[in-house]
Image: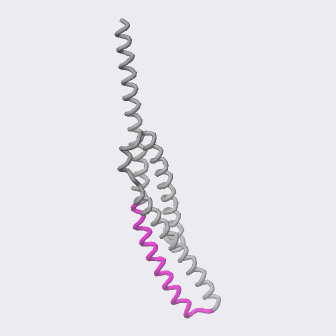
Amino acid sequence: MSKLIVSIAGLLILSGTFWSCNSGEETVKETENEVFAIHDEVMPKIDDIMKLRKQLKQRITSLDSLKSTGSAAATLRTDEEKEQASRLSRNLVVADSLMMEWMSRYNGDTLAKLSSDEALSYLTGQKDKIIDVKTKVNASIEQARQFLGKK
């Protein structure tokens, strides 16, 4: 009877260890999926960034043309608008750069080499970073669209 109890206890310990490892791997995979869901949401917006940068550049060019024909008051307004367009364009460049930097630094291949806790820690940091990228991408796009009068 005691051998049976020891055997059952051993099986319970082994199955608990297996369940714990399996649960850790599942948590890592779920977290990795969350990270990539954010990436996949943001990535298509890079096209929007490129289009908006082009539109801002065209706006700056047209403001330069207006400046040469306008009054002093109109020139001041044109200079302010041009500066705002340039700032918004720079914000779009920064947002794009942040996305490209995140993608180049993300190292998912090493996840398999890490313990579940280390992998989870790495992914949590990456999730924070990609959320920051998402925030900056969305804000720069929204500001540029508002400036250009688009939704």
Whether residue 65 is in magenta: the answer is yes
Using the image, determine if residue 132 lies above or below residue 81: above
Count of labels shown? 0
Residue occupying the point 40% across, 51% down: 36
Asked whether 26 or 143 is in front, the reply is 26
x, y percentage for residue 130? 47, 55
On whether residue 15 falls in the magenta region, the answer is no
* Image quadrant assignment for residue 119: top left
Q: How is the image coloured?
A: one colour
Instruction: Determine whether, in the image, residue 40 is placed left or right of residue 80.
Output: left
Splitting the image into 4 quarters, where does residue 2 fall? top left
Prevailing SS of the magenta stretch: helix
Residue 97 percent location from the top left of the image = 46, 66
**52 horizontally vs 81: left or right:** left
What residue lies at 37% left-to-right and 24% top-to-bottom?
14
For the record, the magenta segment spans 43-71
Closer to the camera in the image, 81 or 115? 115
Query: Residue at coordinates 35% horizontally, 14% vertically from top-left?
Result: 7
How far across and down, in percent of the image, does residue 71 sit? 62, 92
